[in-house]
Every structure is written in structure tokens, then in C-alpha cells.
Image: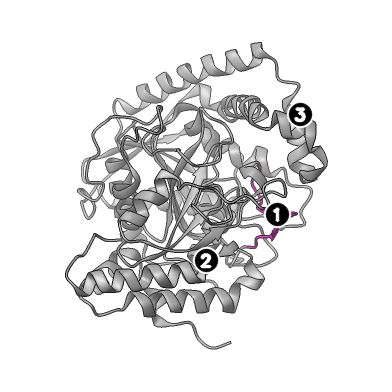
């Protein structure tokens, strides 16, 4: 296979400068990404639908506008992919399912509307765990998505295609969704940045739900800066989503490049146990790196986080059952075996269980905010191990991964997953940075400072 185009080496921040300066053509850039998809995605299966004609049309439009001096911002002419839960008018939107195998929406999700209006180019719709209900992205209907660092390993889920596309260089940036960790888990497995912003910060209008009170829609990108640039576009109140916040939207890039001198950061004791030796070693090295940047790193305790993932899963499963109830009555055999089993298990959750779990969420947030009174952010590993093998039936994917990510879904806090290096096997390792509600600026500042000190990761050798 020929070497990939050097145009694929640039992150969004660099691309935006080159596109605006007319050093790169959006048409040429888009074709380079389409060629890359054709060259490698048969093995990775990060896409369900490639929208080549749409992409070329949007790229030509972007080129005309930029040439005329009508630059729309950092994503103008940048090729992206959307998790196939996001409605796209006139374009197949499957949810990764057989049930919606021919569903074509007649309107766009708000997240795509805002990115399209910012000039983004849509490469296609990305693979996922069926209906976003799982953590492997082994999809029985549209193909098993694979980790670009090792094709025998999972890319994480449920936004597996969104994470895999970033490191395989088949999209410059992507959108994922996160209900129990489904942005951060793929970012951790694949070695990229995944941001779950504060719940309600980004509209969920036109995004297929899994669990209404836990769902988030957000960026998966190469860098913290790219995540900030994307959040600048998609954040903000949406009249079509009654749950979207009216909290003012800051410039999420405003404190990037800043240092960490005098900053206190807390390591969550309850989320720093039961991890593998490679994860522990990389996490401790990251803590040491933060200390060398001027931060004071100290342990904090949030006792309710011990069972935080269980709380999140009770809520998730009860609310998922509500969405899937009719299809489970009418088309149960059209679900993949694992997702059908989860929905059937959901039927055992009582109203009492659900109410108690919702009440526990308030306690969890209160304890987290207490820990954050004296700390700018909180830290934890993103998962127990590096990406498991696809055929490893001995590993409880959901329990071991959601244990670390689920608590901040339950609390609604912003959290970013950022790589801490590679294991001896060459697999990505990662940590989470968790902040106060609506303080994504701080979370991204810490992520950016660490990322610059860490340096780039070696790319996978596809």
C-alpha cells in the first residue's frame, strides 16, 4: 500500500491555519481522506456509510468560500465523521442496528447542523456498538470495528468507529456519544482524546438516545486543542432540546498553552485500585509529569464513586428499556445477542431501584464537588487495562471499563480521556481528567499542558 498523504498528518488546529491561508485545498484534503478510507477501512470497519459525494460537494463549497475570503472558522473545509446515532437529513442513519437498517432521517441533528454551518465536510457515518449499548463495537450487523494499533483488539465502545477513525487517519475529527463512557473508552483504547463535556452543555436533538438523563454528545479528536475547537462550535443552548443548558459558552481555547504552577489536582482513591501494572505505571508517570509542570498532586476520597458505575448502569438500563420496549415486543430477533440480553436484563430493574439510583447520583455529585473545593481537577485511570482482544470472552468489558468512566456520567461532570503512552505491547494507555460542572476550560487546560509535556505518541503501523 502506498504511503498515506502528508495532508493526513495535520490536526484540526494546524489544518485550519493552512486552509485559511489557502496553502491546502479543501477538495484535495477531502480526497486524501477518502483515499485513506478506501485504502484501510476494509480492515478497520470504522465506517458504516461513506458519503463521498456529499463530502466532495461540501469541500468544493468550502474552497469557493475560503477563496472568496468568507472563512467560517477553524472547521471550515475540515473532513469529519459522525457516530451513526446522529441524524443526517437524506443520509442513512442506522444506530448500528438491523432494525434501522434503512432509516433515512428528514432532518439533521443539531450537532451536525452546527458543524455543517461552521463549514465542516462530512466523510460519513461511523460504526458503533449496536444502539450504543456496549463497550466493544463488535457489531453483528455492520461488521466488527477493530483497533488500529492491533486489529485483533477492540477499539472500545460504543463510539468505536469514532475513536478508530482518528488514529487510523480516516477522519480529522469525529463526534461520539457517552452514556457510561462511550467517548472516553474508545479514546483510551485507541490512543486519542475523548471529551465528555458537562451534561446539557451540548444539544442531543436528533441524536438517537440510549439513556436520556445520562447521554452526552461530544468530540473525539487528536488533541485537547482540537476538542476545545470542536466544543466551541457544538456547545450552547438549543431550543429543540429542552434539557440543553442556557449557561454562557466560554471560549474553550482561552487557557490552552497555560502552565499548571500552583494548581492542586486530586487523584481519586476509589478509582485508582484494581488496575493492571502497565496502566498503573503509565498513570503514575503522568502524575509525576504533572508535578514537574508545577501542579501539586494529592489523593482525595469520593466514597460514593466505589459503586458509581453500578448507579450509572441501573439508570442507563432502565431508561434504555423505555426506548426499546416496542421493538423488543415486535422485533426481538433483530437485535444482536449481547444487546438483546442487556435489554432483557433491564426488565428486572424495578422503579424502586431506579429512584434509589437517581437519588444516589445527587450524593455522588455532592461528594465530588467537596473534593473539588480545594482542587482544580480530579484524576483517575480511564480503564483497567489496555484494549482487550476481540475474542477474549474472559474479560468483563462493561464492568471493568465503565467502573472508571460511569461515575462522571452519573454526576454529569466534564471529563476528558487523554493518552499517557503505550504499553510494552504497543497498545495505548490513558487517564481521565474530571472537573467541576461547566468548567471544561480547566479540564482542557490541564489536558493540553500534560499533552504538550508528554509529546506525540507513535502512530499505529497499519
Mark 2 or 1, which is nearer the eye?
A: 2
Does the rendering let one see residue 450? no
Along the horizontal axis of the image, is 171 left or right of 308? Answer: left
- Counting residues from the N terminus, which is met first, the one under dot 3 or under dot 2? 2
Residue at the (49%, 71%) spot, across then down: 53
- Counting residues from the N terminus, which is met first, the one under dot 1 or under dot 3? 1
Label 2 – label 1 distance at C-alpha: 22 Å
Q: Which residue is mark 1?
A: 138
Residue 135 magenta-highlighted: yes
Q: Position of residue 134 (x, y in %)?
A: 66, 43
Q: Residue furthest right?
A: 333
- Where disc 3 sits, the SS reads helix
Quadrant of the drawing holding the C terminus:
bottom right
Q: Position of residue 54 (x, y in %)?
A: 46, 67
Residue 185 magenta-highlighted: no
Badge number at residue 345: 3
Secondary structure of the magenta portion, mostly? loop
Q: Residue 193 lies in what quarter of the image?
A: bottom left
- Chain part drawn in magenta: 134-146
Residue at the (47%, 21%) spot, across then down: 364
Amino acid at each position: 500500500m502506498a504511503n498515506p498523504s502528508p495532508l493526513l498528518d495535520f490536526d484540526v488546529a494546524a489544518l485550519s491555519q493552512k486552509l485559511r491561508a489557502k496553502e491546502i485545498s479543501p477538495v484535495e484534503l477531502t480526497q486524501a481522506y477518502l483515499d485513506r478510507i478506501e485504502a484501510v477501512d476494509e480492515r478497520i470497519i470504522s465506517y458504516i456509510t461513506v458519503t463521498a459525494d456529499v463530502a466532495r460537494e461540501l469541500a468544493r463549497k468550502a474552497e469557493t468560500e475560503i477563496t472568496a475570503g468568507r472563512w467560517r472558522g477553524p472547521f471550515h473545509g475540515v473532513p469529519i465523521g459522525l457516530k451513526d446515532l446522529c441524524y443526517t437529513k437524506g443520509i442513512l442513519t442506522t444506530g448500528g442496528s438491523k432494525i434501522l437498517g434503512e432509516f433515512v432521517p428528514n432532518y439533521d441533528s443539531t450537532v451536525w447542523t452546527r458543524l455543517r454551518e461552521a463549514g465542516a465536510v462530512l466523510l460519513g457515518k461511523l460504526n458503533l456498538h449496536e444502539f450504543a449499548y456496549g463497550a466493544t463495537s463488535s457489531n453483528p450487523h455492520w461488521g466488527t470495528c477493530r483497533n488500529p494499533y492491533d486489529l485483533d483488539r477492540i477499539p472500545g465502545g460504543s463510539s468505536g468507529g469514532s475513536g478508530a477513525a482518528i488514529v487510523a487517519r480516516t477522519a480529522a475529527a469525529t463526534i461520539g456519544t457517552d452514556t457510561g463512557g462511550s467517548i472516553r473508552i474508545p479514546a483510551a483504547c485507541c490512543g486519542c482524546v475523548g471529551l465528555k463535556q458537562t451534561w446539557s452543555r451540548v444539544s442531543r436533538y436528533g441524536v438517537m438516545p440510549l439513556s436520556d438523563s445520562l447521554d452526552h454528545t461530544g468530540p473525539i479528536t487528536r488533541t485537547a486543542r482540537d476538542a476545545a475547537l470542536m466544543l466551541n462550535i457544538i456547545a450552547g443552548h438549543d431550543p429543540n432540546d429542552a434539557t440543553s443548558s442556557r449557561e454562557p459558552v466560554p471560549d474553550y481555547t482561552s487557557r490552552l498553552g497555560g502552565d499548571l504552577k500552583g494548581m492542586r489536582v486530586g487523584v481519586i482513591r476509589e478509582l485508582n485500585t484494581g488496575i493492571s501494572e502497565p496502566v498503573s505505571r503509565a498513570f503514575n508517570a503522568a502524575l509525576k509529569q504533572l508535578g514537574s509542570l508545577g501542579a501539586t498532586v494529592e489523593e482525595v476520597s469520593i466514597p460514593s464513586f466505589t459503586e458509581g458505575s453500578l448507579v450509572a448502569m441501573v439508570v442507563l438500563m432502565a431508561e434504555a428499556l423505555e426506548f426499546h420496549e416496542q421493538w423488543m415486543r415486535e422485533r426481538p430477533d433483530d437485535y444482536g445477542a449481547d444487546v438483546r440480553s442487556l435489554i432483557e436484563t433491564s426488565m428486572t430493574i424495578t422503579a424502586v431501584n431506579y429512584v434509589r439510583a437517581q437519588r444516589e447520583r445527587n450524593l455522588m455529585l455532592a461528594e465530588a464537588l467537596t473534593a473539588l473545593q480545594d482542587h482544580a481537577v480530579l484524576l483517575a485511570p480511564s480503564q483497567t487495562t489496555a484494549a482487550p482482544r476481540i475474542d477474549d470472552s474472559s474479560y468483563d468489558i462493561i464492568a471493568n471499563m465503565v467502573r472508571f468512566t460511569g461515575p462522571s456520567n452519573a454526576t454529569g461532570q466534564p471529563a476528558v480521556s487523554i493518552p499517557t503512552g503505550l504499553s510494552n505491547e504497543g497498545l495505548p494507555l490513558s487517564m481521565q481528567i474530571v472537573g467541576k460542572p461547566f468548567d471544561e476550560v480547566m479540564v482542557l487546560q490541564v489536558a493540553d499542558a500534560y499533552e504538550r509535556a508528554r509529546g506525540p505518541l507513535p502512530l499505529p503501523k497499519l
